[in-house]
Amino acid sequence: MDSILDTIALVLVLIGALLCLTAAIGLVRFRDVPSRLHAATKPQVLGVVLICTAIALSLRSWPVVAFLVPIVLIQLATAPLSAHMVGRQAYRNGTIDRASLRVDELAESSETPPAAGG
């Protein structure tokens, strides 16, 4: 049973490392901000989750699992938030091609309201 769990852990580490590598390549190769945000969040978070799962399977210890659960939860919470903030700032700076957006929900918020005096 131990050799099976070790083999599963090895496969999970390899898949997680491959996903993290594809995220890094995507950050370098993609040209626009939304594509880079996609590459920075989705495969990277899944890669970290798979690596943490592999560590838990390999070490087979409850204190290790208790240590890894907050790492996964923080990763799941902070990656989408940081991507949202980077995307919003890129929109405000004008580095996103607004013509390529299907729905532009922020277009109304960038206009100065009439009561603002500006």
Image: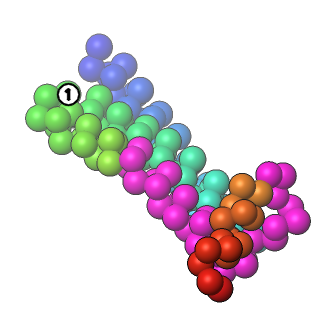
Point out the image quarter for the C terminus. bottom right
Is 57 left or right of 43, judged from the image as shown? Answer: left
User: Residue 90, position in %: x, y?
Assistant: 64, 73
Q: Secondary structure at mark 1?
A: loop
Q: Main secondary structure of the magenta part?
A: helix
Residue depicted at 40% across the width and 54% down the height? 78
Q: Mark 1 Cα within 10 Å, few/some/many (few <14, many 20+)?
A: few
Residue at image mark 1: 60
Residue depicted at 46% across the width and 55% down the height? 81
Is 45 left or right of 5, judged from the image as shown? Answer: right
Can you tell which quarter of the image residue 61 is in? top left
Q: Nearer the viewer, residue 36 or 65?
A: 36
Q: Does residue 21 show up?
A: no
User: Residue 83, position in %: x, y?
Assistant: 54, 59
Query: Is 11 inside the magenta-drawn segment?
Result: no
User: Residue 87, position in %: x, y?
Assistant: 61, 65
Is 23 left or right of 35, judged from the image as shown? Answer: left
Q: Does residue 41 show up?
A: yes
Q: Is residue 47 above or below residue 114?
A: above
Residue depicted at 20% across the width and 28% down the height? 60
Query: Is 77 inside the magenta-drawn segment?
Result: yes
User: Residue 38, position in %: x, y?
Assistant: 64, 54
